[in-house]
Every structure is written in C-alpha cells, then in structure tokens.
Amino acid sequence: IEQICSIFRGAQIQSKKEALSLSCDDKHQYRILGGRNIERYYIRDSAYIDIDHRQLESHRNQIWRQMCRRIGIQRLVSSKVRIIGVILDSRDITYDTITNLVFDKEENIDLFHILGLVNSNLLTYYLKYFIFNNSSLNMDMDSHYVGRLPIILDEKESKISQYTKILIKNIKKLKEERALQKSENVEDILHQARNIVRLEREIENCINIINTQVYTLYGLEYEEVLEIEKDLSNNSRIK
C-alpha cells in the first residue's frame, strides 16, 4: 500500500487543551479524533478543535497535511491484532494515535474499496502473521508496517466498494435508531427494536460479503479461508 499513498501519524497535540471544545461552534469547526474515537467503518464520537489557536502554531504542518479525504486507522494494536479503519474527510484532524493514509488524487483511488480491504479478516490475518510475526507485544501501525499491506486495486467499482458503502449507511442508520430509543410507547419500542435487529443482520451480512469478496480477489482456497476464520474467531470477537 505504501506505493500508492503517504502514511503518517496525526498531530501530537493532546496537551493543547485550550484549543479544544466538546461542542462545535464558530471557532471549533473541525473534529479532533484519537484512536479510541474510531471503530471499523465509523466514527464513535469526537471533540472539536480550533485549528487557528495560538497553542497549535508549531503544529500547523501536521494539521494542514491532514486536510483532505483519506483513511485513518488506529495506530496502537494489542496482541489481539485487529485493523480498525475509517474514511476521514478534510475537517477531521487526528491525534498521533491514528495513522493517516493519504492517496494521490491523480490515481483516482476508490477509498471504499481500500477501506473494505484494510478492514477485512484477510489483511488482519496477514498483518498478524506475515508482518507482526504473531508477536505477543503491543505494536504500532506506523508506515513501516502498514506500508507492507498487500493491496489489489480494481479498475471499476468493485463489489467490495459497493458493500462497504451499504455497510457505512446501515451503521449510520443503526446509530440513529439507537439514539431514538427513548419512547415510552410500546409499539414504538417494538418497532425500533425490530429495526435494530434488522440493521444488525444487514451489517453482519455486508461484513461477510466483503470478507468473501476479498478472499476471492486474493485467490484463496476454501481450506485457507477456514483456517483464517478459525484463527480470528479465537483471537477476538468483532462487533
């Protein structure tokens, strides 16, 4: 992947508290994200940052280089290896606990396709055994390691890209449904519960389809897929 993108940590600005706010306002219009703020395919929550604040003067370049559409992944990885990636936009600024992947605009890279690959079980397995050598230590997802992930591009919109888009939309709908679970009306509660169950099934289905498409794209045999799925199911539960 290092051949098609720039890979770098976010800004080391955790101590710049005066530049931060819990809410978005005229000054704090950019989201600030750390590794704990992201999950596979979506952003959990965030604070906001005033990028023009005097405290950030010496970090301007670290911030400006992030002002584009890109992929962010959690930098710190435990021994239970799991790649966690999300699409970020130009108004998402990251701490150094997120590794940023910025792709050349002229290459016209499909970020949804790349995100589906990065979050797939196959690349997590590859990272665990062929890059980290099944290390029991906590590791950093820096360019030295992330750059070695094998990426296969598709000239047209792939099924991986299509289902990644559907997955992201369904996750957004699921978050909205959960946020609405405040009604005291029994019928409303049951309706919301059914919607949540349906969306959870659709999300799981999309994840399974993406993983299957990735296995096919990389030419894995059935026995190899079984080995990977067995290994990762023993590793950790993916929610």
Image (spheres, rainbow, N blue to C red):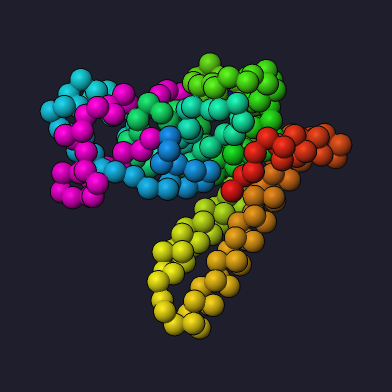
Nearer-the-camera pick, 104 or 119: 119
- Is-magenta flag for residue 60? no
Relative to 83, 184 lies left or right = left
Seen at 16% across and 27% down, the residue is 55
Q: Residue furthest left?
A: 54
Left or right: residue 215 versus residue 197 is: right
Nearer to me, 235 or 90: 235
Whether residue 109 is visible: yes
| Residue 8 part of the magenta-drawn span | yes
Q: 149 above or below 182?
A: above
Residue occupying the point 70% across, 51% down: 209
Q: Residue at x 47, y 66 (%)?
A: 177
Q: Horizontal and vertical percent for residue 128? A: 66, 25
Q: Position of residue 208 (x, y in %)?
A: 69, 50
Tell me which corner region of the image, top left, top right, bottom left or bottom right, holds residue 82.
top right
Q: Please report the bounds of the magenta region as a residue range.
A: 6-34
